[in-house]
Amino acid sequence: MRIDVKTLPVQEIIEDLARSLGLEVQNGNGELVIQIPENLGEGYIRGASFDPGIGVITYNCKFYEDVEIHFSLNTIHPLKFIFCSEGSVGHSFQSQEHINTVETYQNIIVSSSGYNGHVLYFAANEQTHVSSLEIIRSSFVARSNHNFRDLDPTLKDLFKDDVSKKQFFYQGNYSIKAADLMEEIDNRNYTGFLRSIFLEGKTFEMLAIQIAQYQDDEAEDKLPQILRKSDIEKVNYVVRRIQGDLGSNHTVESLAKEAGTNVNKLQEGFKYVYNLTVNKYMQHKKLEAAKEMLMNSEKNISEIVVAIGLNNRSYFSKIFKEKYGVNPKYFLKTRKKQS
């Protein structure tokens, strides 16, 4: 199935997709959503535009047949930062036959030349979760960008190329930072105004992550530290294991064994992805959960200490204050005042 998109910005792209599929658009305070009908597949496509000149489209869906989305405009196309956190997606420039495959945990940065468009390819019966940051450079360069100071020269030229003189394609190494961010966007139950500002903030955070990864990959002053996709998948398995059972105190050895790797490789992966050891990451997640419970649950401090798998309340207070600058009682007082 071929779908043609001939509009900008993101909100109009979503409306164009809906018209092509014969569907209605749901509007939640500026975030437009298309629910894929049962005869075509499952899941959704949604998007939002922000000022000035940036928007995000999320494809979290599975089609029952191969789908090609052709972006063909009689104007300059956006600069795109595309990340895949599940499944895979293909990309090509309209003037070229070659298709580049973006696998799970990979990103691409693409800019067409002139009015040359883009095509995205979704394989039949493959669950896919993809985000596409769409930057209309003629608008984006008008914001206060501090002349893109300290940005890699290639990216600086790319952002400033508001008439799309040059074609650009970059495919990154594997990372799960952006995947974590996409999951957070999906699972955070904000609505209305709060959802709108949350999504805008996370869109810029996603942009920062992908720019930082590009600069890290291209750095000449150090040897590249590239992990295979299988290594990243094992890190991701351990991350989910930790997050799903914060009440336990896993050892690094047991987690490495479960993931089918060794301790050194697992530590290397966590250092590469999060710049933390496995134990520091575990502590970080336990403290995040504790802060959330202090703010939003009826549990007392002793109950929270048990819930995150710690035995010593004094130690909990110590590491909590090191991370957040205040002791846990502060958050309890804040909650009681709000009540």
Image (cartoon, helix red, strand yellow):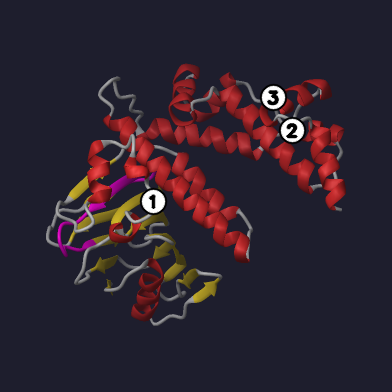
Quadrant of residue 230 within the rendered picture: top left
- Amino acid type at circle 2 is Ile
Q: Earlier in the sequence, mark 2 or mark 1?
A: 1
Q: Position of residue 188 (x, y in %)?
A: 61, 54
Q: Secondary structure at mark 1?
A: loop
Residue at point 50% right, 46% down? 181
Q: Position of residue 20 (x, y in %)?
A: 33, 79
| Residue under numbered circle 3 | 322
Q: Is 197 drawn above or below residue 231 in the view shown?
A: below
Front residue of this view, candidates 110 and 243: 110
Q: Earlier in the sequence, mark 1 or mark 3?
A: 1
**Could one spot residue 165 in this view of the protein?**
yes
Q: Secondary structure at mark 3?
A: helix
| Residue under numbered circle 2 | 308
Q: Position of residue 179 (x, y in %)?
A: 46, 45
Q: Which mark is residue 250?
A: none
Near mark 2 (Cα within 10 A), the count class, few <14, some 14-19 or many ≥20, is many
Query: Magenta stretch: residue 292 in it?
Result: no
| Residue under numbered circle 1 | 87
Residue at point 56% right, 24% down? 278
Q: Nearer the viewer, mark 1 or mark 3?
A: 3
Q: Position of residue 103 (x, y in %)?
A: 33, 46
Magenta region: which residues?
103-118
Q: Secondary structure at mark 2?
A: loop
